[in-house]
Image (cartoon, rainbow, N blue to C red):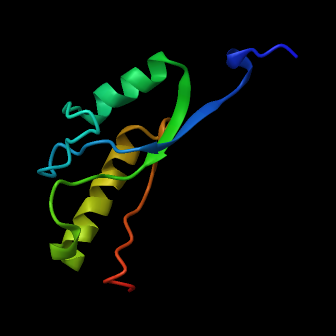
C-alpha cells in the first residue's frame, strides 16, 4: 500500500486559535503567543486543509458569566468569518449555563 499524503484531506480537530480582542486567549501549550493568522499559516504549511477548535483563556472558567461565554463564542465565529475555507469553530458550552 502506497501512502501519499497529498491524496488525503487532513483536518486538525483540536486547535485553540487566539482572538486579538479577548485578553488571555493568546496562550499556547508551549508558552508562545500566536494569533489565528500565524497559527493557520503554520498549519497550512504542513498540509493541513482545515482545522476546528475553540478558544482557551488563562482565567478561571468558574468565574465567567453567561455574557463572557457569549463573547468567547462570538470571537470564534468572527474567526470563522475571516477564514471560512479553513476554520470550523468549536463552541464553548459551560454547564453552569445550560440555556
Check the image and name the residue furthest to the left.
Answer: 23
Quarter of the figure with residue 98: bottom left
Depth check, front residue: 74 or 54: 54
Q: Residue at x 38, y 46 (%)?
A: 81
Quarter of the figure with residue 48: top right
Quadrant where the N terminus lies? Answer: top right
Quadrant where the C terminus lies? Answer: bottom left
Q: Residue at x 36, y 54 (%)?
A: 77
Q: Residue at x 39, y 21 (%)?
A: 42
Depth check, front residue: 17 or 3: 3
Is 74 above or below relative to 14?
below
Is 70 above or below relative to 52?
below
Depth check, front residue: 40 or 13: 13
List x then y, in percent, for residue 64.
18, 73
| Left or right: 14 in relation to 8 | left
| Left or right: 54 in relation to 32 | right
List x then y, in percent, for residue 12.
52, 37
Is 92 above or below relative to 23?
below
Quarter of the figure with residue 16: top left
Check the image and name the residue furthest to the front.
Answer: 30
List x then y, in percent, for residue 86.
48, 36
Check the image and name the residue furthest to the right.
Answer: 1
Depth check, front residue: 85 or 60: 60
Amino acid at each position: 500500500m502506497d501512502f501519499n499524503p497529498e491524496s488525503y484531506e487532513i483536518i486538525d480537530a483540536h486547535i485553540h486559535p487566539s482572538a486579538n480582542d479577548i485578553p488571555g486567549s493568546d496562550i499556547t501549550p508551549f508558552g508562545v503567543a500566536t494569533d489565528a493568522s500565524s497559527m493557520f499559516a503554520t498549519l497550512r504549511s504542513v498540509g493541513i486543509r482545515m482545522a476546528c477548535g475553540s478558544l482557551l483563556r488563562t482565567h478561571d472558567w468558574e468565574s465567567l458569566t453567561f455574557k463572557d461565554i457569549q463573547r468567547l463564542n462570538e470571537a470564534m465565529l468572527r474567526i470563522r468569518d475571516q477564514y471560512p475555507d479553513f476554520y470550523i469553530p468549536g463552541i464553548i458550552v459551560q454547564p453552569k449555563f445550560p440555556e
